Image: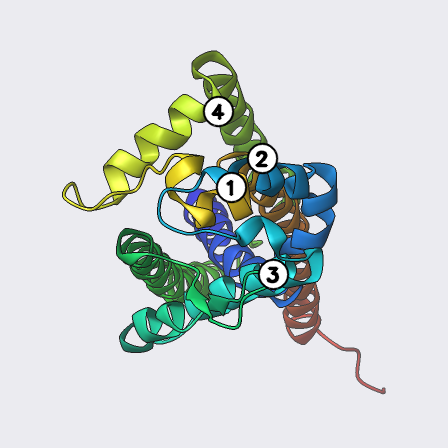
Amino acid sequence: MRVLTTLSALFLSLALAFIVSWQAISSVNFAYPVWYLALEIDKTIAKYGPQNQYRSGFESTTQAQHMQFFEEIAQSIDLPLEQVKPALQSIVYIPKGSYLSKPLLHDAEVQHLYDVAVLLNNIQTACYAAFIISVLLFLLSFQRQTRAQKTVCLRVKDVYWIMLCTLIMGLVLVALIGFEAVFYQVHEWVFPANNQWFFYYQESLMTTLMQAPNLFAYIGGLLLISMLVVQLFTVFVLQRVLSSVMHKKAGLFTPSRGLI
């Protein structure tokens, strides 16, 4: 039962950590303004904007507009799937000295971002399913152990040893293979083969605006840190709640002295 309790707590807290952390970092625009300055994305736009094969004049847009464009993209891929493409297609910019607006994204970029939206939707669905199943297994384990009058075994360090070992193995693997190689391989696995997902800076304002894949390393790190914090807190709360419940149950079975 200890194994079932630990594993159910692990997946419960992991699923909840992703759901909460994703909502948290998306609510602050994935800290894009911070990464924009850290990566000097304005210089990337100034360099590759004039070289773009499909759009012109993007280099004349301002830093505030860049923040807005990224936020509009991030909000669009979080919409119901049937609304994603129209929302992405509605994002426009007006080059300096022009009165005509231009679509920020061309068709291949819109399709790729739609594929991203589908992927995120599937991940969130999987997380909700994992959370519900893990809660049920956790409650089942708790019920069986209390019926057998056993102490429910859940130690924070057990869960975090598993997470720490998994994290270290993942980081070592990424360090050996290289972040870009891992990034591109994952894209080949998760996106439809016939849809373009790799874009040179000269052919994509989306890639230029995000300085891909560099920006995603920073966002991924932020997501990971947030998930670890939420997961530690979740497991800690679970342990305290279980300890409190077990203490109360133990008190109920303690014989009381009557008055003589």
Of residues 119 and 95, which is closer to you in this image?
95
Q: Is residue 83 above or below residue 224?
A: below
Q: Say above or below: 48 vs 101.
A: above
Q: Nearer the viewer, mark 4 or mark 2?
A: 2
Question: Residue at 50% across / 63% down in the picture?
Answer: 74
Specify the quadrant of the image occupied by residue 183.
top left
Tell me which corner region of the image, top left, top right, bottom left or bottom right, holds residue 184: top left
Left or right: residue 186 versus residue 245 is: left
Q: Residue furthest front?
A: 97
Could you tell me residue 108's position as x and y percent?
A: 27, 52
In what element is the residue under mark 2?
helix
Do the residues under discs 3 and 2 have CB atoms within 8 angstroms? no
| Sequence-wise first label, 1 or 4 | 1
Distance in Å between CA atoms under marks 1 and 3? 13 Å
Badge 1 or badge 3: first in the primary sequence = 1
Confirm or deny contact between disc 1 and disc 2 (CB under 8 A). yes
Proximity of marks 4 and 2: CB atoms separated by less than 8 Å: no
Task: Give 49 or 73, whichever is nearer the viewer.
Answer: 49
Secondary element type, mark 1: helix
Residue type, label 2: Lys
Q: Residue at x 62, y 53 (%)?
A: 60
Residue occupied by mark 2 = 47
**Residue 47, horizontal then vertical, whole percent:** 58, 35
The answer to whether residue 82 is left or right of residue 217 is left
Q: Relative to the observer, which residue lies in front, 164 or 6?
A: 164
**Which numbered circle lies on residue 50?**
1
The residues tagged by marks 4 and 2 sit, at their Cα atoms, a distance apart of: 24 Å
Given this view, does label 4 or label 3 mark the residue nearer the observer?
3
